[in-house]
Image: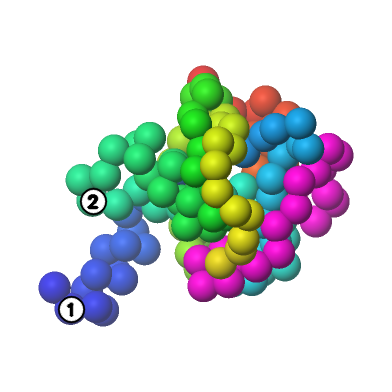
Amino acid sequence: MSKKEFLTVFKKTPRVTVDTVIKDRRGILLIKRSIKPDKGKWHFPGGTVLYKEKIFHAAKRKAREETGLEVKIKKFLGVFEYIRYKEPGYTHIINLVFLAEPIRGRLWGNARTAGKELKFFKKLPRNMIPEQRKILQGKLIR
């Protein structure tokens, strides 16, 4: 399949993603996006589940890739659906959200996959991806 054909299919197919809400005594860890979409906004570590990848593995992998931390999944929080046809990179996303705690690692950002600036928040920042703020407010699909 050519790249053009792949992108055509990719844009028209719902995508399964994971978000990992990493929380400890310092608060909730967020990353300031350095890539599109939502460049400059705070968000959870997360991303697309790969072909043949188990969901829990994807959540742990994305947390490690984007924060440098190994995490322990504590709880499944629910499903959230993003539908933004006007923004490249979103279209239709079915997002599985997990609560996790850091267990080891050194905190660092990854500008290529998410962003270099990471911070624990006790109070959510204003400049956060709106859908992710809703996740923390309990507005998930059950």
Earlier sequence position, callout 1 versus callout 2:
1
Residue 50 is situated, as x and y percent measured from the top left of the image, at: 29, 52
| Residue drawn at 18 percent across, 78 percent down | 2
Mark 1 residue type: Ser
Residue 127 vs 104, above or below: the answer is below
Q: Nearer the viewer, residue 100 or 125?
A: 100
Disc 1 element: loop
Q: Which residues are magenta?
A: 111-127
> Label 1: few (<14), some or many (≥20) within 10 Å?
few
For the question of whether residue 83 can be seen, the reply is no
Please name the residue that numbered disc 2 is placed on.
51
Determine the residue located farthest toward the left in the rendered image: 1
Question: What secondary structure prevails in the magenta region?
Answer: loop
Residue 81 is situated, as x and y percent measured from the top left of the image, at: 51, 40
Residue 73 is situated, as x and y percent measured from the top left of the image, at: 49, 29
Please name the residue that numbered disc 1 is placed on.
2
Horizontal arrangement in the rendering, residue 122 relative to residue 140 (left or right): right
**The disc label shown at residue 59, or none:** none
Mark 2 residue type: Tyr
| Residue drawn at 36 percent across, 63 percent down | 11
| Residue drawn at 52 percent across, 22 percent down | 75
Residue 62 vs 115, above or below: the answer is above
> Label 2: few (<14), some or many (≥20) within 10 Å?
few
Disc 2 element: loop
Q: Label 1 to label 2, Cα distance in Å? A: 18 Å
Question: Which callout, 1 or 2, points to the residue nearer the camera?
Answer: 2
For the question of whether residue 140 can be seen, the reply is yes
Q: Nearer the viewer, residue 3 or 92?
A: 3
Residue 51 vs 7, above or below: the answer is above
